[in-house]
Amino acid sequence: MEKIITIESTKGLHAQLANKLVQVSNKYDVEIYLQYDNVRIDAKSILGLMSLAVPNGENVKVVANGADSLKAIQEIEKLLG
């Protein structure tokens, strides 16, 4: 399952937001990735997420595989969007 999400935070994907994203990603039984600018990072890795340096207003692709894919993507969309 995939979803394109626009980063709405005025600071982009900053450390605090990345930490929340890791917490959400770890709640679910899924393999989940964020893709930005042709780089794909495990959404359960805070260092990986911060390395993406996604600015405000940019789109990321969230890709999830597993039983809870829909729930995970919906919660991530609420967090980022």
Image: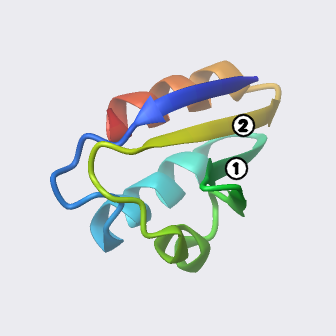
Residue wearing tag 1: 33
- Total number of numbered labels? 2
Amino acid found under the numbered disc labelled 2: Val
Give residue 74's position: percent from left, percent from top: 50, 23
Give residue 27's position: percent from left, percent from top: 59, 45
Single out the residue that lies furthest toward the left.
Answer: 10
Single out the residue that lies furthest toward the front.
Answer: 37
Single out the residue that lies furthest toward the right.
Answer: 66
Q: Residues within 10 Å of mark 2 (few under 14, many from 20)?
A: many
Give residue 76's position: percent from left, percent from top: 47, 36
Point 72% across, 37% down: residue? 63
Q: Is residue 72 left or right of residue 30?
A: left
Find the distance from the CA under tag 2 to the CA under tag 1.
5 Å
Callout 2 touching callout 1 (CB < 8 Å): yes
Q: Is residue 80 left or right of residue 30?
A: left
Point 60% across, 25% down: residue? 3
Give SS at disc 1: strand
Give SS at disc 2: strand
Point 34% across, 39% down: residue? 79
Residue wearing tag 2: 63
